[in-house]
Image: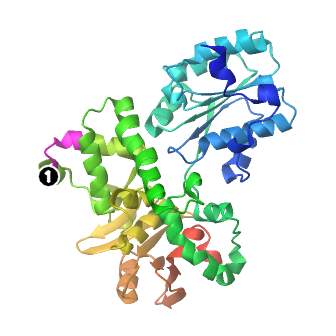
């Protein structure tokens, strides 16, 4: 590997700090959590979808290390998006051209490897260096969820802490804009925050879009830089996929009807592909963090059914990126926004009766029904009660109140407030 290939990534070797444009002033919650593990020997893995800010977070970590007095040359950053480099060639170039010694002879070295899944045999090479050199701290990142989670879990078990880096939450999105929500002031802040919910949903929580105002640029970014890159490049490279048309059709189906019931036999006939092929492709899309499947919880809450899964995007913005800014079905948009906020694993359906989501909190099941238009509270309460539940939530367009009836307690929460504080609703009303 040429020395110039790695020196262009590591400005701090000359200047003592990363370039300001690489940092961003905002520090996301994972930043503090990751720093708490810097003194541990274990490898730190940051994984998540493309463009959610993993690289920025790595540069912020580098900036923090430099502020603590770490020798700039003891911090090596490299992105494996840059050609077909290997970890061995990178370390060899670093030793011979930068530190003029072996890494084992340095007091402590930080090797920060971005998009590491693109380096051949990365997990085994890192394992060897980790076992041989206790003074080396690896901080790695990757976008391909299946590759990173499966291969690191198998090879680096006991040697690694992982951190999921997702898109910005609604709170983070607002803070990026200079708005600082406070739970105790939610009624006062409603008029300034509520109008920004759809802006957040359309932009998907991608940091680079927070202050972008051109709708065409927003949708193009999400479609071409995020969604198409995963579907047309990352997945084919990782799994040897040739039928990208099938991947695109499954994405388009999800955009047309978020929450559709997954029937493999029906899809096989409709799409002209084998049932097993469709099963595999749904698997690929889910583990690349494009879609999420939600299982039907059977009566008694004893098990989730493998049948009747529902399919959603992990990010509500994908619906708009595929079909444009149409607001014909805001109920489905709201439903997908709730899923993005709480990432539930289950819903309930029996006959014609259905509860959108079942999530858990403190070991208790909590039913969530999303009703962005008109609805009948009594029917929903009756269904909650039928399942033996004494507590539940209805997510509405604007309404907030509590209904207590026959031992049942139902919180009706406006969508903007639920997405803002999905895990703190009990503190509000």
Q: 89 or 210: nearer the eye?
A: 210
Q: Quadrant of the N terminus?
A: top right
Q: Is residue 274 one of those drawn in magenta?
A: yes
Residue 250 image position (x, y, % from top left): 27, 50
Quadrant of the image occupied by residue 162? top right
Q: Can residue 220 be seen in this snapshot?
A: yes
Q: Secondary structure at mark 1?
A: helix
Task: Sort mark 1 into few (<14), some (14-19) or many (20+) by Cα contacts within 10 Å.
Answer: few
Q: Quadrant of residue 241?
A: top left
The residue to which callout 1 is attached is 270
Q: Is residue 383 above or below residue 206?
A: below
* Residue 309 can be seen, yes or no: no
- Residue at 71%, 54% (x, y): give it: 26
Q: Is residue 231 above or below residue 319?
A: above
> Going by the image, does 94 lie left or right of 49?
right
Q: Overall secondary structure of the magenta stretch?
A: helix
Residue 202 lies in the magenta stretch: no
What is the magenta range?
270-278
Residue 399 location (% of width, % of height): 50, 86
Count up the numbered dots.
Answer: 1
What residue is at 27 percent from the left and 56 percent from the top?
A: 253
Whole-percent x, y for residue 285 in the image: 36, 45
Residue at image position (70%, 44%) is: 21
- Name the residue nearer the viewer: 327 or 266: 327
Q: Residue 92's x, y, as percent?
A: 65, 11
In the image: residue 272, left or right of residue 97: left
**Residue depicted at 48% across the width and 77% down the height:** 393
């Amino acid at each position: 590997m040429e020395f110039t290939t790695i020196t262009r990534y590591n400005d701090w070797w000359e200047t003592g700090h990363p370039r300001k444009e690489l940092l961003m002033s905002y520090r996301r919650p994972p930043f503090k959590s990751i720093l708490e593990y810097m003194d541990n020997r274990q490898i730190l893995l940051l994984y998540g979808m493309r463009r959610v800010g993993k690289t920025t977070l790595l540069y912020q970590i580098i900036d923090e290390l430099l502020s603590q007095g770490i020798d700039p040359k003891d911090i090596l950053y490299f992105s494996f998006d840059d050609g077909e480099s290997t970890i061995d060639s990178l370390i060899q170039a670093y030793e011979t051209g930068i530190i003029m010694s072996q890494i084992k002879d340095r007091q402590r070295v930080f090797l920060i490897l971005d998009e590491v899944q693109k380096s051949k045999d990365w997990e085994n090479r890192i394992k060897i260096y980790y076992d041989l050199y206790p003074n080396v701290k690896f901080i790695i990142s990757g976008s391909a969820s299946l590759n990173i989670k499966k291969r690191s879990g198998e090879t680096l078990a006991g040697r690694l802490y992982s951190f999921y880096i997702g898109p910005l939450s609604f709170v983070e999105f607002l803070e990026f804009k200079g708005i600082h929500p406070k739970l105790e002031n939610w009624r006062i802040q409603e008029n300034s925050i509520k109008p920004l919910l759809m802006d957040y949903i359309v932009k998907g929580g991608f940091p680079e879009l927070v202050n972008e105002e051109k709708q065409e640029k927003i949708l193009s970014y999400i479609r071409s830089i995020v969604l198409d890159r995963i579907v047309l490049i990352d997945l084919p490279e990782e799994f040897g996929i040739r039928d990208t048309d099938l991947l695109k059709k499954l994405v388009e189906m999800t955009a047309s009807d978020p929450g559709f019931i997954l029937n493999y036999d029906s899809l096989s006939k409709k799409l002209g592909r084998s049932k097993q092929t469709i099963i595999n492709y749904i698997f690929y899309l889910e583990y690349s963090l494009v879609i999420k499947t939600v299982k039907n919880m059977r009566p008694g809450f004893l098990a989730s059914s493998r049948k009747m899964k529902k399919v959603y995007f992990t990010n509500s913005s994908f619906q708009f990126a595929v079909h444009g800014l149409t607001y014909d079905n805001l109920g489905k948009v709201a439903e997908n926004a709730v899923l993005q906020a709480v990432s539930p694993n289950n819903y309930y359906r029996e006959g014609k009766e259905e509860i959108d989501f079942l999530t858990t909190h403190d070991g208790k099941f909590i039913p969530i029904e999303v009703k962005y238009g008109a609805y009948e509270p009594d029917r929903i309460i009756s269904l909650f009660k039928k399942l033996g539940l004494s507590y539940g939530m209805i997510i509405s367009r604007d309404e907030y109140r509590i209904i207590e009836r026959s031992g049942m307690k139902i919180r009706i929460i406006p969508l903007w407030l639920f997405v803002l504080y999905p895990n703190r609703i009990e503190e509000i009303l």
